[in-house]
Amino acid sequence: MSEEPVLPRIRPEIAALPAYRQGRQASADAFKLSSNENPFDPLPGVLEAIQGASGINRYPDATAARLRERLAARHGVSSDDVHIGAGSVSLLAQLLLATSGPGDEVVYAWRSFEAYPSLVAVAGATSVQVPLTDDFRHDLPAMAAAITERTSLVIVCSPNNPTGPTVTHDDFAAFVEAVPADLLIVLDEAYAEFVTDPSSVEGDRVRAIIARPNIVVLRTFSKAYGLAGLRVGYAIGHTRVLDAARSTAIPLSVTAAAEEAALASLAAESELLERVRVIAERRDRLVARLRDAGWPVPDAQGNFVWLPAGGRALEVAAAFEEAGLVVRPFAGDGVRISIGEEESLDRIVEVAAATAPR
Ligand SMILES: *Cc1c(COP(=O)(O)O)cnc(C)c1O
């Protein structure tokens, strides 16, 4: 029997993290509803834009200046108040590195986006997870109460992945008032385009009303814009806060193809809005049918729905997989189903009816 090889030393908090394994790819006849991806083809002009992107033997424009300028105009800020990243997850990682290290605490709701715990651990900081309310919303008063002098960053995810509800504008505004002015608040709005509840917080509006440098809004081209495979997202915030993020960034991570595709997608605004409308309408119909089938589905404002299956999450997800529906289980909590093709809906409702709690 051969001996175990000696492995190089790893930071203990990193060795303790579960190794990243991507969800199973769907088989040919299955619907992949596990990663909140967009079911549509790229927006018009995107493929041509990628083909026209400058030579791949050259480095990209380090600051993605043209995309920053376009986004700045769109969001009514200066282009230094926009920062582009290879996905908004990388922007969150930068903000964590810029603010948080060993001994610091990062407060966020739980359950929320699965990337948060590992990004916090990689920065060397400690997660403080504040349980969601019984209706799967952020408990902002409890989050405010969890803030101490050790707190270095707070994340608010609206709509909350994976449960679906948004934070309201009024609740977010009250939260900002309740926390120290020098504490960075990251508002993760990966699903902002799908929101139809007008009482929800919205990054531009809240930053205009509460003109404070400690709010940074994260947006992505991965979900509504359907560019998940190209990795491009952006942050909007105070120039000096974003400068700190820029200082921690891995240089030249945003490719020219990603920048061109994002620019082309922004030029296809009317098609984008139409697709977003289709998905939000499909989502609302699915929620109604799932509730009729016996599932207490919380308010869904993203491009996904949440089945609060609790301890049955793995078993319920297995029933969906059996029916050719690849969904995303969170053991002990529930099952998230992305809004995909129209043809997947009847199958989803069928399995949901067969697995509903009684
Ligand atoms: C999908 C998602 C992101 C965006 O990821 P990208 O890195 O931009 O692809 C960010 N936050 C949440 C909550 C998400 O669900």
Image (cartoon, grey):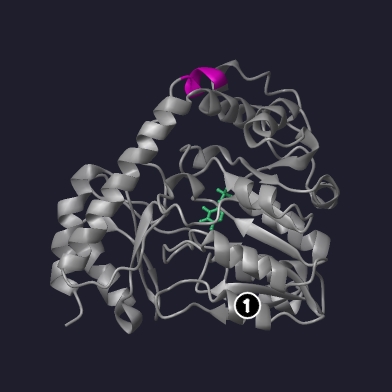
Kindly tell me whether residue 13 is visible in this rendering: yes
- Is 188 in front, or is 250? 188
SS assignment for the magenta stretch, majority: helix
Displayed quadrant of residue 299: bottom left
Q: Residues within 10 Å of mark 1 (few under 14, many from 20)?
A: many
- Is 299 in front, or is 65? 299
For the residue labelled by badge 1, is the local secondary structure a helix, a strand or a loop?
A: helix
Residue at 46% x, 41% y is: 224
Horizontal and vertical percent position of residue 208: 68, 47
Relative placement, left or right, of 165 versus 57 is left
Residue at 16% x, 55% y is: 347
| Quadrant where the image shows the N terminus | bottom right
Residue at 80% x, 80% y is: 150
Horizontal and vertical percent position of residue 229: 51, 40
Relative placement, left or right, of 222 versus 290 is right
Q: Which residues are magenta?
A: 45-49
Q: Amino acid at mark 1?
A: Met
Horizontal and vertical percent position of residue 126: 72, 78
Q: Which residue is mark 1?
A: 143
Kindly tell me whether residue 6 is visible in this rendering: no
